[in-house]
Image: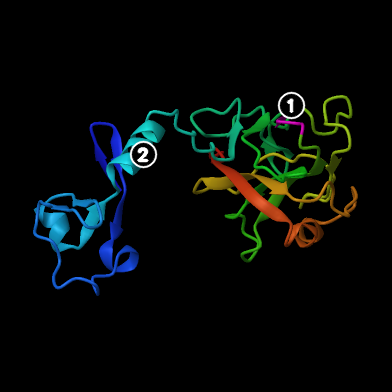
């Protein structure tokens, strides 16, 4: 496809659209082939065997080129509020295991849920936890209706703030609610916040369902994912 001063000229391969078999030779460069009313674009395209549509067709293409372009769909995206340059603050940090945070679940919002999505699952997972490669699930909320676009700050454990029908499932703290970051002292840990768009209105889980069961129930139903990676590092004593 060639763009010339806002006019779209569509080129096709001659061998596919107009066989040369009825003619002794191909037309000369930069000329009009009167028998077929097709015009070469230029010398270089002629060498490639390319030509453009007849004038009437080019006029149609030019008209179509003036129509408003259809905007590409925005990607499914996710945001986490109240962070400090991408780092969790003491407000979201766990209270326990030697950590002294407020353990308030953050506001998590998403946009541009893809067509066909019928529910959302949100998780927060630490892949750097010293658990032999299993990581650590800090929060999991399943069966969020597709009409919802966020989990409010402090929604964990608060039925008034959680979306209707949403279920908080077990974390690796052994509770069915948010547990904030509390990594061992040393290097910063990553906290992967993920929103999964599912093609089913709900998955078969309860408040007692483990992270593994939630993942199993989502398998084969995910149509899109949006992620945000936050960090946190425990301060030395």
Q: Which residues are magenta?
A: 147-151
135 drawn magenta: no
Q: Quadrant of the C terminus?
A: top right
Q: Residue at x 33, y 63 (%)?
A: 17
Quarter of the rendering containing residue 101: top right
* Residue where numbered disc 2 is placed: 61
Colour convention of the picture: rainbow
* 10 Å crowding of disc 2: few (<14), some (14-19), many (20+): some
- 153 sits left or right of 68 in the view: right
Q: Residue 145: give x, y in percent of width and height.
A: 80, 37
Quick one: SS at disc 1?
loop
Pick whichever, 206 or 3, lies toward us.
Answer: 3
Q: Residue 146: give x, y in percent of width and height.
A: 76, 37
Given this view, does label 1 or label 2 mark the residue nearer the observer?
Answer: 2
Q: Residue at x 51, y 48 (%)?
A: 186
- 173 sits left or right of 24 in the view: right
Q: Taking 92 as reference, is 236 above or below it? A: below
Q: Residue 91: give x, y in percent of width and height.
A: 66, 27
Q: Taking 83 as reference, is 3 above or below it? A: below
* Residue where numbered disc 1 is placed: 152
Distance of label 1 from label 2 (alpha carbons): 49 Å
Q: Residue 3: give x, y in percent of width and height.
A: 26, 40
Q: Residue at x 9, y 56 (%)?
A: 29
Q: Residue at x 60, y 25 (%)?
A: 82
Residue 227: mark in rendering: none
Quick one: SS at disc 2?
helix
């Amino acid at each position: 496809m060639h763009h010339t001063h806002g006019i779209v000229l569509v080129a096709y391969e001659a061998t596919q659209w107009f066989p040369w078999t009825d003619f002794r030779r191909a037309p000369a460069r930069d000329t009009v082939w009167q028998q077929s009313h097709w015009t070469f674009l230029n010398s270089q395209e002629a060498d490639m065997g390319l030509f453009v549509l007849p004038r009437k067709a080019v006029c149609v293409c030019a008209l179509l080129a003036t129509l408003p372009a259809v905007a590409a769909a925005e990607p499914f995206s996710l945001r986490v509020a109240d962070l400090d340059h991408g780092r969790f603050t003491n407000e979201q940090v766990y209270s326990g295991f030697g950590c002294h945070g407020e353990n308030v679940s953050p506001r998590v919002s998403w946009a541009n849920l893809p067509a066909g999505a019928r529910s959302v699952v949100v998780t927060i997972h630490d892949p750097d936890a010293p658990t032999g490669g299993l990581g650590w699930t800090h929060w999991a909320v399943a069966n969020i209706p597709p009409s919802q676009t966020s989990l409010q700050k402090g929604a964990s454990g608060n039925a008034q703030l959680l979306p209707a029908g949403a279920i908080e499932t077990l974390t690796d703290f052994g509770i069915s609610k948010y547990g904030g970051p509390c990594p061992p002292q040393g290097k910063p840990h990553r906290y992967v916040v993920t929103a999964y768009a599912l093609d089913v209105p709900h998955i078969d889980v309860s408040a007692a369902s483990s992270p593994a069961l939630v993942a199993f129930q989502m398998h084969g139903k995910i149509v899109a994912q949006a992620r945000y990676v936050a960090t946190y590092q425990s301060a030395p004593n």
